[in-house]
Image (cartoon, rainbow, N blue to C red):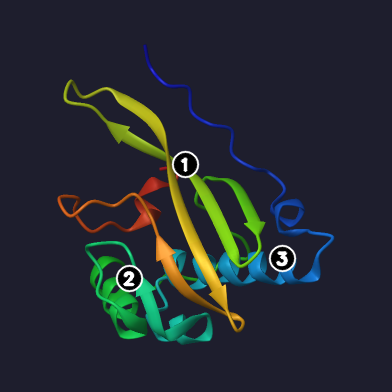
Amino acid sequence: MTATAPAVAEDHEALLASDDPQLAANKRLVYDMYRIVLQGGYADRAGDFIREDYVQHNPNAAQGLAGIEDYIRSTRPERPLEDKIELPLINLVAEGDYVITSFVRREVDAEGQTYYTTWFDMFRIEDGKIAEHWDPMTRNDAKIDPNSQRLDD
């Protein structure tokens, strides 16, 4: 049995909308950080979105704003900025001070067969910036550039 690829969201503006202006602002903050810093590779822009005392739960990245800047510089080049996230975004959910993103992730098994799974990131917002981050990365995983997960490659 193989997993079916999750459906990718077509309407990102609908994902960013909320009746609660604070939730909409939190979603936009995470979305733009992902688009500019993680997708675009602009490590020098991380401070626009991320606090100096950023708490990182990815075991392969160091703590603080400097830690995420170093991680970005070591895993991806700067690319032209795009108007939207071009990675296969499934959903963007906000509740309280938290925003969760989910993306399609293409993998290859031991037999060389491609399959699809899901990658999740969770961010905590404090005073208008990202203060904390969780993802499923393990210490044994290699550092990644999420841009390698675009489905049009």
Question: Which residue is painted at 26% across and 66% down in the image?
Answer: 75
63 sits left or right of 37 in the view? left
Query: Percent x, y for residue 146?
Result: 38, 55
Is residue 22 or residue 149 the one in the foreground? 22
Q: Which mark is residue 152?
A: 1
Question: Which residue is painted at 38% across and 54% down in the image?
Answer: 135
- Element marked by disc 2: loop
Question: Which residue is painted at 72% across and 65% down in the image?
Answer: 23
Image quadrant in which the N terminus is located: top left
Q: Badges 1 and 3: C-beta atoms under 8 Å apart?
A: no
Query: Percent x, y for residue 39?
Result: 45, 64
Q: Quadrant of residue 44?
A: bottom left
Image quadrant in which the C terminus is located: top left
Of labels 3 and 2, the one closer to you: 3
Q: Is residue 115 above or below residue 90?
A: above
95 sits left or right of 112 in the view? right
- Element marked by disc 1: loop
What's the distance in space between the residues labelled 1 and 3, CA to CA? 31 Å
Q: Which mark is residue 77?
A: 2
Residue type, numbered disc 1: Asp
Query: Percent x, y for residue 29?
Result: 61, 72
What's the distance in space between the residues labelled 1 and 2, CA to CA? 19 Å
Residue type, numbered disc 3: Leu
Of labels 1 and 3, the one closer to you: 3
Report the residue that reaches farthest toward the right.
19
Question: Which residue is painted at 70% across and 72% down in the image?
Answer: 25
Mark 2 burial class by Cα count in 10 Å: few <14, some 14-19, many 20+: some
Residue type, numbered disc 2: Pro
Q: Which residue corresponds to mark 3?
A: 23
